[in-house]
Amino acid sequence: MIKLKIITKIAGCFKAITFILRKSSVNMKNTYRILFSFIFILVVHFPSFSQTVQDNSSEHEITVFVIPEVSAVNWENPAILFKSTMKCYFNAALKKNYYVIGHFITRISSPLLDSTIYVGMNGAVQTEKVESVLKHRVGFGALGMTMKGRMEPFNHIKKGLALYGKRNRVAYLKFKVDENAIKRVIQFLNYYQTKNKLGFAPCEHYNGALWPGYENEGSGCSAFGMTILDIANLLPEFAKSDWMVNVNVPMNIIGGEFNQNKKIKLKTILKTKSWYNGDGKEGIDFVNYKVFDPGKVFNWINNKRQQNDSDFIPDDENIYHGVIFNEKYISPDLSTPVIKQRTDTTFFARYFYKFLRNKYEVK
């Protein structure tokens, strides 16, 4: 759980207790015993949020750092997408890389917080998706697979930002917000990382076809970052058109649990030169897939830096370059719940809820 302004109070209490014990008749052995007990209580009842750094920010800010894929991922058609994605993994093997197909990291800074928070979502096993395609032959079913997920450790985030910043492969989008936006984001982050009554935390499930703003759903890295913006009322209206990929995947290249456990040969994918564009039925002829693409957002930010746009102003932080939204202190709609119920169940989402029912007996 994320703490709000308790460190100063704890330090003050610790100092006061130490002073009293020194002035009292309690011997030093008992003094240390009491102090250690006090520390133990603090650790148990006030767990720290590991992905933080010290910060004295006087403003409320939400910043999304975007790292593009190792080499351009091309969504022109399934065959080209497969080839360009495999090229990413090949290039990643030649040079040290943390984020093969791109990544989103969000920073939250506020006087309400003890420290600046950096958060990101990723798969717990980096090779799981590749193996699902090359070894288990699920084809493009990998786009909607549920895999082991985790909140990215802060030391990994720190190394990743430093590495890609030096390569000039980080761009950011910064917003000034009010404290209500920060409170809503904190509520979401606490919910997302806390085990629910069913026995799991949503962050334990990595799935690029989900939206973590819906109850019990995990996500991929991009949906996680965009959900934070959405909860704070920061997600631009143009995001779906400028930042999102929206394709209809032919059913004949989707295998595994989504298509009668069929094995999809690589040559079948390589022969598929177009996305589905007919009048067929979803789930039988095709599956619709939407995702916010890190490469698109990265290019959008860099293009904005070159334009004379009064809404998005060029901004720099040492080795990082981005834009800042020029409208300050955006307020969220407090009547909108932070966590919503999904109403428009998609093809891949239906299988995710089936997964929950089988594993956690979710109704």
Image: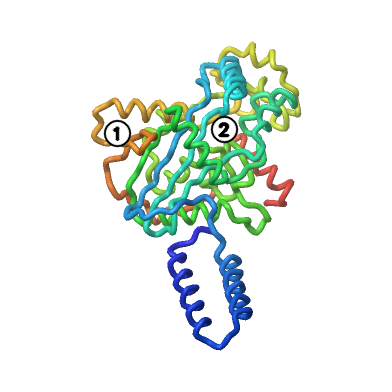
Distance between the Cα atoms at labels 1 and 2?
27 Å
Seen as rendered, the residue at the extreme bottom is 25
Q: Residue 23: image x %, image y %? A: 49, 85
Is tag 1's residue or tag 2's residue first in the polypeptide sequence? Answer: 2
Q: Residue 218: image x %, image y %? A: 59, 44
Residue tagged 1: 314
Quarter where residue 349 is shown: top right
Q: What number is the disc on residue 158?
A: none
Q: Looking at the picture, does residue 148 appear above or below residue 71?
A: below
10 Å crowding of disc 1: few (<14), some (14-19), many (20+)? many
Which residue appears at 51% of the width and 81% of the height?
A: 22
**Residue 280 can be seen in this image:** no
Helix, strand or loop under label 1 = strand
Quarter where residue 194 is shown: bottom right
Going by the image, does 119 lie left or right of 353? left
Query: Between 21 and 138, which is closer to the camera in this rendering?
Result: 21
User: Mark 1 belongs to which amino acid?
Assistant: Pro
10 Å crowding of disc 2: few (<14), some (14-19), many (20+)? some
Q: How many marks?
A: 2
Which residue appears at 68% of the width and 55% of the height?
A: 199
Judge depth for marks 1 and 2 and give the one in front: 2
Helix, strand or loop under label 2 = loop
On the rendered image, what quadrant is the N terminus found in? bottom right
Q: Looking at the picture, does residue 128 appear above or below residue 250?
A: below
Residue tagged 2: 98
User: Mark 2 belongs to which amino acid?
Assistant: Tyr
